[in-house]
Amino acid sequence: MSSTQFSTEIQTTISPHSQEPYTTRIYPSITELDATIAKVAAAQKQWAKVSLDQRIQIATKFVEIFTSLASSPSSPLFTELTMQMGRPIAQTKSEINGFLDRAKYMIAIAKSSLQDIPIVEQDTGKDKPGFKRFIRRTPLGVVLVIAPWNFPYLTSINSVLPALISGNTVLLKPSPQTPLTAERFAAALIEAGVPEDVIQVVHLTPELTQHAVEDKRVDFVSFTGSVVGGKKVEEAAVRANGFKGVALELGGKDPAYVRSDADLDYTAAELVDGAFFNSGQSCCAVERIYVHESIYEPFVEKYVDIVKKYKLGDPTDTSTNLGPVVSLAAAERIRKQVDDAVNKGAKRLIKEGEFKEEKMWVGTTYVAPQVLIDVDHSMDLMTEETFGPVIGIQKVSSDDEAIKLMNDSPYGLTASVWTAAEHNPASEAAFMNIVDQVETGTVFLNRCDFLDPALAWTGVKDSGRGISLSKFGYDQLTRAKSVHMKIKTA
């Protein structure tokens, strides 16, 4: 049984924890979907006339409403998210906090990001005599946001709120695994003052999603998901003709490099969390670690000691810090990747059965954490996305070797470097050398698995293209219109 069952009419979400149906939704017909797109397209013309200040006020009110919802002791927000996608309830609040933090930041920079850009001459600081020129940011129109299940709030806020603030209308298509999250999001926006036709949640089959992408009334598509899914969205956009814009935030195989001068206690703890939070089901989870040979053995020992303290089990239990993966199919794929690596010479450092009291059985969605050594790039474990609570740790002899291995991947979302750069100019210089050479969208120093809304979120290679968050996120959701005025002089 897969995590989500599809029929021609009904979408059923299966809880990873219980493997029982959790909620159902009815898919629209093509005629109904077309009518929804028509409503959103018509509403955009009026929404674009609402002043930027008013749109910012509505967005600010939305944050207040959602903050109140998240603060209510009786709020079902956290339990329903845990039941839909399996993350331990003790960790769920961090997603909501991040969701609100990103919203606040994008609201704070909205005016400066979307205001007219005047043209001035370098020598005078003014426009040319007799002319007034500026660049205006104008909305694209209808934006289709296709959100994933692993961080449904965090990923959707990246595009939905800035799209609305920019004057676009939004079709929000959640994953079938987490349908309630989009409905919660949209309901709060509407309560804050966003007209109902400006934000529409649509539950769609893959075929209906393709139909929406191909619709000429949809002006831009923001997709977060798999490489395979991203290619399908891109192909559908091409079939639509008209050069429709597409942003793709896809897979990752994010590396970490631990240099010889890293703080071992701090680094090991941070990289365990970076690899195993949300059962490793994060776009920018650490999936492979390279450690300088001079500290390899003590690092591995510390790392394994921390992993063994994890509690795998019922995600509704507040003491659990490792829940199930999203589906039976995902669990089997993860186990197969580990087995294939072992068959090629990798060594498991977590003994089989060590977590068996927590339901670690073949045939369940509960996958015990695993640390493997004696790994190399002949193994899928070190080259293909795992998206599970598994890490491979490989020994390296130099920065150059680490850089080569970090870049030996079809993906390029984030990378992290762990070194005493803040105390050592030579280490800082070495870090900056790595920054300039590593092929990735974000490079971290002494942190990982984090998205700062002030920075552009982007990837290279098969991790996709396009940008969300930061000022550049607004640039992606608008088009530049140049205004060139010749002013008659007396």
Image (cartoon, helix red, strand yellow):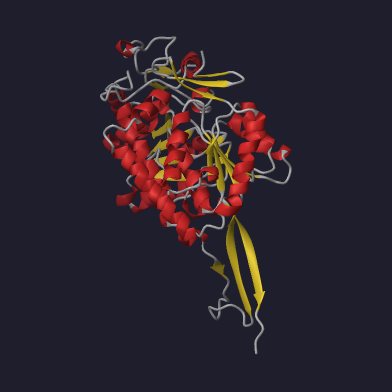
Vertical position of residue 139 compared to residue 96: above or below: below
Residue at 58% from the left image edge and 71% from the top image edge: 119
Residue at 43% from the left image edge and 52% from the top image edge: 58
Front-lying residue, 186 or 82:
186
Front-lying residue, 201 or 131:
201
Looking at the image, which residue sits at the far bottom?
490
Residue 90: quadrant of the picture: top left
Q: Position of residue 205 (x, y in %)?
A: 60, 26
Residue 127 shows in this picture = yes
Is 485 left, or right, of 408 in this rendering?
A: right
Vertical position of residue 319 compared to residue 62: above or below: above
Residue 151 shows in this picture = no
Residue 129: quadrant of the picture: bottom right
Vertical position of residue 205 compared to residue 53: above or below: above
Front-lying residue, 173 or 61:
61
Q: Position of residue 261 (x, y in %)?
A: 32, 41
Q: Position of residue 138 (x, y in %)?
A: 59, 57
Vertical position of residue 344 compared to residue 78: above or below: above
Front-lying residue, 401 or 221:
221
Is 301 left, or right, of 38 in this rendering?
A: left
Residue at 52% from the left image edge and 44% from the top image edge: 458
Q: Position of residue 289 (x, y in %)?
A: 42, 32
Is 276 left, or right, of 143 in this rendering?
A: left
How many labels were placed on the picture? 0
Q: Quadrant of the C terminus?
A: bottom right
